[in-house]
Each structure stands twice: as C-alpha cells, then as structure tokens.
Image (tube, grey):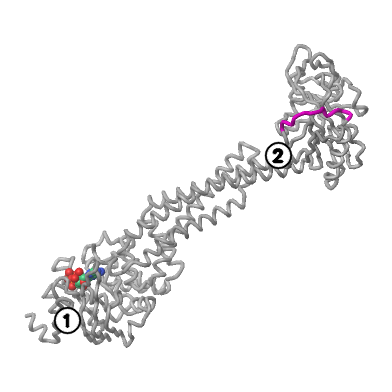
C-alpha cells in the first residue's frame, strides 16, 4: 500500500470520529503548548536577569565587606561584617595596575526636600567614576566632580523621577535641595536607565561618598565597584584586591571579592536549570496525552476488529495493518503538536504586545524538542495498539461475535 | 487448481482439542462452481478459511495453483489472497466510514494500482454491479442486496481466480438472495471458480458440484446434472 494511500486511509478513519479525534488533539496541543510556553517564559526570565547583570559590565569586580564562607555559588547577601571596608581601603586599590576605575558606594535612605515638596529617596554616595563604571548617562548638567574622594562636596545628581516629583517641569540645575539636615546643589540629572537589578536609578540621588558617610554617620562602605582594565585582567584584579585588602586588614581576608562574570554565569546556570526543570514537569502532560492516544488506539483496534480482518482477507499483510494504525497515532500526535505550537506562538505574540520583556521568540530548541517528543510519543504509544491490530487473527476478527 | 490432501484443523479450547476438519481430501479444477453444505459446526467456514489462506491447517497439504501454500510465509499468503482470492461474507463487512466506491477500491489500493487506473476500474465495476448511482453512499445508506453486491464487486475487482462466499445470502430475504446468487453465477460464467457455503438447499442445488460436510469430514461430493436432477 502506497504511503499517500496509507495517510488518506488513516485520515479518513480519524475524521470518522471527529469528536474523539478533536479531544485527543486538544490534549496533545495543551501539553505541547505548555512545554513550549513554560520554556519560553523561563528563557525570557533568564535573559532579563542576565541582561541586567551584563548591563553592569563584564569587567566589573565587586568587593563586599565581610567574608562569606561558601566558596563559589551565589554572592553573599548577608556577609558578617567583621571590619568596615573603608574609603582608604578603596583608594589603596588604585595601587593595582589592573584597576582602571573605582567607585566606592555608600547607600542609605533619606528624605529629599525642595521647597515644601519632600519624599523618601535612596542616596548613593560615590565618586565621579561611578558614571562610567555603572554605564550611567546624564540627562542634563554634570555628574559629581572629580577630585579627592575624601573631600565631601555638596553636589548632588538626581534621578528622573525625583526631578519630576520635586521640580515638575522646571529645571533643577543649580537648585539647592535638602537631604536630611544637609543642603546639596543639583549639578545634573540622570538619564532614565530603567530598573537595574532592583535599584530604580530614577529614584536615586547621587552625592559625593564622603558627604554620604557624614550624612549616615558611617565609616564603612556598602560595597566597592572596581573596573578591571579589560576582561583578561579580571582575575588579576581580584587577586590584587584580595592581596591589598588582606595586608591592610592585618593579614585577615575579611572581604568578599566577586566578579560580575561569575555572578552572571551562576545566575545563568541556575535559571537555565530551572527552565529545563519546568519544561520537564510540563512534559509530563505530554506523556499523559500520549497515554490518551494509546487508550484511544486500543479502543479503536478492538472496535475495528472486523475491519482489520477484512483488510487481511483482502490481502493486507500484518505490517500494512500495523502501519495503518501507527499512522493514526502519529497523525494524532503530530496534529496535536502542530496545534500546540500554533497556540503557543499565538499566546507569545499576544503577550509580547503587552510586555516588552517577553518579546523574545519561542526558544527553537524547545519547539524542536516538543515536536520530536510528540513524534516519539506517537510512535511509543501507537506501537503497542498497532502491533495488536497486526496480530489479530483474521478468522476470529471476521467472525460475528 | 486446488488440491487438499489429508487436511486436519484442530482448535484447542482450553485442554480440549476441537476437530473442525478431519482428513479432508479435495481437488477443485479451475472454473468449477461448488456448493458446500452441512449442519452447523460441521466445519464449512473452517474449510473455506483454509482454502482462502486465512487459516493454516494443522496437518495435511494444500496446493493452490501449483504452489504448496504451507511453504509460503504470511506475506506471501497475503499476496496470494490479494491477487487470486476473493471473499464474500454473510455480514458483508463493508467499512462503514467509506463510500461504496471507496470500499470497492480497497483491494486496488492495497495492490498499489495507480490512482487513475483505479478510478476507471472502480467506475466500470460499479456499473457492472448496478451501483453507479450509489457510488458515494455509505454502507448504512444501502439496502442489504446493494451491500452484498458492493461486497461482491469489491471481492472481484482484482479479477481473482477463486471466489469464496460464506453464506452470502444468509442476511438477505429470498428475492434479494436470488438476485445476489445470479450475480455470483454470472461471475462464474465469466470463468471464476466459485465456492458457496449455504444452508439453503435450493441455492446449494444450483451448483454444478455439491459438497456435504459433517463433523469435520467431507461426506458427500456430487457432480454434474445429477445434482440439478436431485434437487428437482
Ligand atoms: N477459533 C475457533 N476456536 C475454537 N473452535 C473453533 C474455532 N473456529 C471454529 N471452531 C469450531 O470448529 C467447528 C467448525 O466450525 P465452523 O465455523 O467451521 O462451522 P460451520 O460449519 O461454518 O458452522 P455454521 O454453519 O454454524 O457457520 C465448530 O465446532 C466450532 O466450534
Ligand atoms: Mg460458518
């Protein structure tokens, strides 16, 4: 029997039981769409997070006060602060030839006021080099002045939201704002950079690091951003930082030095594994759909015993009978997978129209995997019923019973 | 064309052997018209299934067109059925979801006859069996006689040498049954070897050679005019 005729025959018998076929295709479609969409969501999430990290620059080395005992893995969020990481510690790192730029950071929350308008804002104390290290850009005016970081000036740079809320449409440049009990002059405003790892730059005030230390009455840095000269210098920069700080801290390494790249790859790895785990769980529904296909094929074979007997009487050998039933299972699986992929891309298109972060395409690997799994399921769960049909004794199958 | 020698067919039901055929010897020449009669359970259908290569005998030899069928594997037997043997059943066995034309075309589809030739042969066959205006009807839209004519059209579209009919009129009223028998006899007139199992003595008597079975044994084999005479 020719391939085209086999397909026609299989399609005809599927079409004869429209409702049954539609339901199986639906089950298969939901399973396929589930796998593809969940993988896509996981992938979009992973990209979002890793893009955020990458925005910070891959030459970046971060020094945190406190020592995390865990080696490798995610960065320590709550290091035990044995000793402060001071501004002098930071400046000492300039001795390393691998360090290109350096931005000490002090962070805190304080009320910002202009005239009678006031609101709570995050204050970032840093130096002029924060601008290039964090890849920030200005909307207007100038950033913090270069110069001795130990000197606490009264300059401040405002994020976009703060400008709008405190000044409305007026230009804030040159105006004096109050941060807590101190006065600062606005020298510039930050261009909107969106959210960066949970820090909404639009809602921040940047002031000189020494001024921030005075404002918060603190000697310790929140962290220290170090930019290596290039990617290849990152490892040596880490070594230099550790060596210099160990010496300064009486031979004890009580800081944690992490690289942006390692953070990036750690997150990337975790999120990738998570995505595949989710896809794997979703794939269970594909297996369930496969069992449905098998169930329906077993029923079909027993309902169509007479037909199988007839085909054999007409001269169809067992392999032909087997292929005919296998095609039916395969067509169910493939039609289901096709509908599932169509459904998934429709959902993706709709979601992408509303959420820009979801604009990434369906992951090709997941689409290919789902299609292959569907085919595999068609074959795996269709084989047993098809073999059963092929084994039927024509005499018994034709006998009226 | 057909030569059965010492054919046994034993079914096992639990530990009990059931002898459906016992030592059947039978030779049939090309173009013969036989009827096969006997009480229920005497082995008529079993003999027909053996002749049609749907069933393998437990013992004995079966030569079809000079070929020792016992030596053929399943695929070769299937090919032989496809090319040389047609079946007609009491309950028609038309595929319910297929139209009359599609049912009739089925053997040609299995034999991989090209589409254009197939359509032509199906059209001619439907015309010969008076089913042209029923070509696109499904079996449940046909009368019993039409169904059996469609089944015979299907069984003979590959121009087999042997047509095996197991109680072809069993589900039909007398008038329709006679009509179907005339269709079969016309095919025999064109050279087809015809074997009809029946419980109807009048129908059995029309055959040129009448076989009688009892308890798995061939107990009667009457030929020629005397058969017709005996029936009268
Ligand atoms: N598959 C089988 N398994 C067990 N016994 C069987 C099987 N097929 C037939 N038999 C037995 O073989 C014997 C002959 O059966 P067969 O169907 O050939 O009879 P028959 O002459 O066609 O009867 P009827 O006129 O009722 O159709 C019966 O006793 C039957 O029970
Ligand atoms: Mg019978």
The percent position of residue A273, horizontal first and vertical second, equals 63, 46
Give the residues in magenta.
A77-88
Kind of element beneath mark 1: strand
Determine contact: label 2, label 1, CB under 8 Å.
Answer: no
The answer to whether residue B179 shows anywhere in this view is: no
Q: Residue drawn 21% across and 85% down?
A: B25
Which residue has dot 1 on it? B218
**Of B62 and B226, which appears nearest the observer?**
B62
Give the residue at x 35% y 79%: B80
Q: Is A85 covered by the magenta stretch? A: yes
Q: Is label 2 on the same chain as label 1? A: no
In the rendered image, which quarter contains the C terminus of chain B?
bottom left
Question: Where residue B208 sits in the image (x, y, percent)?
Answer: 16, 83
Q: Is residue B159 above or below residue A332?
A: below
Q: Is residue B91 left or right of residue A42?
A: left
Front residue of A394/B16: it is: B16
How far across and down, in percent of the image, does residue B36 sit?
17, 78
Label 2, ligand 1: CB separation under 8 Å: no
Residue at numbered disc 2: A74
Query: Quadrant location of the N terminus of chain B?
Result: bottom left
Task: Chain letter for mark 2, please.
Answer: A
Q: Is residue A23 above or below residue B66?
A: above
Q: Quadrant of residue A349?
A: top right
The subunit carrying tag 1 is B
Which residue is found at the position 79% from the left and 33% from the top?
A: A64
Is B7 drawn above or below residue B144 in the view shown?
Answer: below
Q: Would residue A130 be seen by someone viewing this image from the given angle?
A: yes
Relative to A310, residue A38 above or below = above
């Amino acid at each position: 029997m020719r391939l085209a005729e086999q397909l026609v025959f299989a399609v005809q018998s599927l079409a004869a039981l429209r409702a049954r076929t539609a339901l199986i295709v639906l089950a298969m479609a939901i399973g396929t769409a589930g796998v593809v969409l969940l993988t896509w969501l996981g992938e979009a999430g992973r990209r979002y997070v890793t893009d955020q990290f990458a925005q910070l620059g891959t030459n970046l080395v971060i020094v945190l006060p406190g020592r995390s005992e865990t080696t490798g893995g995610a960065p320590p969020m709550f290091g035990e602060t044995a000793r402060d990481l001071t501004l002098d510690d930071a400046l000492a790192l300039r001795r390393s030839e691998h360090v290109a730029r350096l931005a000490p950071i002090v962070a805190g929350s304080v009320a910002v006021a202009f005239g009678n308008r006031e609101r709570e804002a995050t204050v970032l104390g840093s130096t002029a080099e924060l601008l290039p290290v964090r890849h920030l850009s200005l909307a207007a005016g100038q950033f913090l002045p270069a110069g001795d970081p130990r000197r606490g000036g009264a300059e401040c740079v405002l994020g976009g939201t703060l400008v709008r809320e405190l000044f409305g449409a007026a230009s804030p440049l040159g105006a004096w704002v109050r941060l807590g009990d101190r006065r600062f002059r606005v020298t510039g405003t930050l261009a909107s950079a969106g959210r960066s790892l949970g820090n909404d730059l639009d809602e921040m005030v940047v002031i000189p690091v020494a001024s921030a230390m005075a404002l918060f009455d603190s000697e310790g840095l929140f962290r220290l951003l170090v930019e290596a000269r290039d990617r290849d210098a990152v490892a040596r920069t880490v070594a230099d930082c550790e060596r210099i700080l160990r010496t300064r801290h009486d031979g004890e390494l009580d800081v944690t030095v992490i690289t942006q790249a390692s953070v990036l790859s750690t997150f990337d790895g975790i999120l990738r594994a998570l995505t595949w785990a989710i896809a794997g769980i979703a794939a269970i529904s594909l297996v369930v759909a496969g069992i449905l296909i098998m169930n329906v094929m077993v029923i079909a074979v027993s309902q169509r015993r007479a037909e199988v007997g007839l085909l054999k009487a007409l001269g169809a050998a067992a392999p032909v009978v087997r292929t005919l039933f296998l095609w039916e299972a395969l067509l169910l699986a493939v039609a289901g997978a096709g509908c599932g992929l169509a459904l998934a891309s429709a959902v993706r298109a709709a979601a992408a129209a509303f959420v820009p972060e979801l604009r990434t395409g369906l992951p090709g690997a997941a689409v290919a995997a789902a299609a292959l799994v569907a085919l595999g399921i068609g074959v795996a769960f269709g084989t047993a019923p098809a073999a059963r049909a092929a084994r039927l004794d024509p005499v018994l199958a034709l006998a009226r019973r | 064309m057909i030569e059965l020698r010492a054919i046994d067919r034993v079914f096992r039901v639990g530990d009990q052997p059931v002898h459906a055929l016992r030592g059947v010897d039978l030779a049939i020449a090309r173009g013969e018209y036989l009827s096969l009669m006997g009480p229920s359970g005497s082995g008529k259908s079993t003999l027909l299934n053996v002749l049609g290569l749907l069933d393998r005998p437990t013992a004995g030899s079966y030569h079809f067109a000079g070929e020792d069928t016992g030596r053929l594997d399943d695929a070769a037997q299937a090919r032989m059925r496809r090319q040389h043997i047609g079946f007609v059943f009491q309950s028609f066995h038309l595929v319910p979801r297929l139209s009359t034309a599609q049912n009739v075309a089925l053997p040609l589809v299995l034999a991989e006859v090209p589409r254009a030739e197939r359509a032509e042969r199906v059209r001619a066959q439907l015309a010969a069996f008076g089913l042209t205006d029923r070509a696109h009807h499904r079996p449940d839209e046909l009368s019993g006689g039409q169904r059996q004519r469609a089944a015979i059209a299907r069984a003979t579209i590959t121009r087999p040498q042997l047509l095996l009919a197991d109680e072809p009129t069993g589900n039909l009223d007398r008038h329709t049954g006679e009509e179907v028998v005339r269709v079969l006899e016309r095919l025999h007139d064109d050279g087809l070897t015809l074997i009809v199992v029946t419980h109807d003595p009048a129908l059995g008597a029309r055959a040129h050679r009448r076989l009688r079975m009892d308890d798995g044994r061939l107990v009667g084999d009457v030929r020629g005019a005397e058969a017709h005479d005996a029936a009268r």
